[in-house]
Image: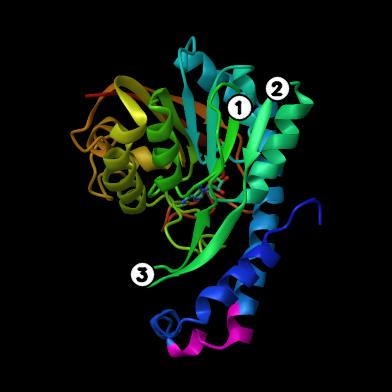
Amino acid sequence: MAFDETYFGTWHSNLAEVLKKRAVRDAFPPTLRSADKLEGIIRQLDLDLQRYALEWQRLSDMHKEYGTYRKIVEFIGEPRGLLIDLGSGNGNFLAEWGDIPSVGVDLNGYCLQLAETNLRQRGLPVVRYSKSSIMPNPEKGLDILPLEGDLHLDQVTLLTDDITELRMTKQVLEHKKAKADIVTCMLWGGRNVYETIHFLDQNAGSFDYKSAARLTKYKLMDNLPAILKSGGRFYLAMRMHPLAEQISSRMGVGTMEEMFKDLAGGRATLTKLTKFPLRQETGLTDINIRGISGVQNETVLYVAEYVMK
Ligand SMILES: C[S@@+](CC[C@H](N)C(=O)[O-])C[C@H]1O[C@@H](n2cnc3c(N)ncnc32)[C@H](O)[C@@H]1O
């Protein structure tokens, strides 16, 4: 594999340690209580994360060549203060900004490793905190918890965290008494909203308003005030099939503008909305609208600007 550092060993010994506690063992469904079974699951998870990181790098480089990240940066305009990119992948979007104080947050430590290499190759100062541990979680099964470090926010910082909760990110910002001026969440496919440890779902990819809404409206928007200044800007870029607009009434969400307004959940004001053509992805995250197949149109990228209340 292409990674210097793997996480399986740490996760495995960590989990073995907590599983010595009876109450923790009992929290698992009976079928998952055997050590072999759990070892198999975390080994698979580790490999899936590696595979995803490499596959996303291929797609992301395609988007980069096509100029997508550049267009988003132009839409946002001059950066000011601290930028936080949620679900930063292999760092192609962060790299477009050059040397500004920024934090890339991703659940997948392998994506962060690729991002570090990518940013360094472009001569940018970067510090990565991608160590994490796996813990049982009664609701999700397993949880990836980041390990803490003494973080600095004056260069590009890469941080492991789950953006549905942003526990580590909030902690770091609180400790530094800092908040971001701009938060971005780029190139999400709506359905690629991963809320459990088994987030690498091969079937994910269809645009699903409900799952996009759950992440944005009920999770991100609720957590944003803790990491983004009041009056700060939040950018959400979602890739969709162009037919999404036409069938939005079937999804019961009205126009795209109404949908993006709704995603704000009353916490922010939608100030700009644009769309660009996007290169069609093939492989990991094919974009399909449920019930419509065989349509070869180019995918579009909607980019929304919100100002936090
Ligand atoms: C489609 S990629 C987009 C990456 C990047 N924003 C870009 O535009 O190139 C989605 C990224 O979100 C990460 N991700 C998915 N679920 C996450 C979660 N719950 N918390 C943090 N990152 C997550 C994935 O590991 C992946 O790197």
Write down the region rendered in magenta: 30-38
Residue annotated with mark 3:
139
| Quadrant containing the C terminus in the rendered view | top left
What secondary structure is the magenta-colored segment mainly?
helix
Residue annotated with mark 2:
124
Residue annotated with mark 1:
156
Q: Is residue 201 visible?
A: no
Q: Residue at x 55, y 51 (%)?
A: 147
On the image, the x and y values in percent for residue 156 come to: 60, 27
Label 1: few (<14), some or many (≥20) within 10 Å?
many
Q: Is residue 5 visible?
A: yes
Marked residue nearer the N-terminal end (3 or 2): 2
Residue 277 covered by magenta stretch:
no
Q: Pointer 2 and pointer 1: residues touching (CB < 8 Å)?
A: yes
Badge 2 marks a residue whose secondary structure is loop
Label 2: few (<14), some or many (≥20) within 10 Å?
some
Q: In the displayed structure, would residue 76 be above or below residue 111?
A: above
Badge 3 marks a residue whose secondary structure is loop
In this view, the residue in front, 8 or 208, is 8
Q: Pointer 1 and pointer 3: residues touching (CB < 8 Å)?
A: no
The amino acid at mark 1 is Val
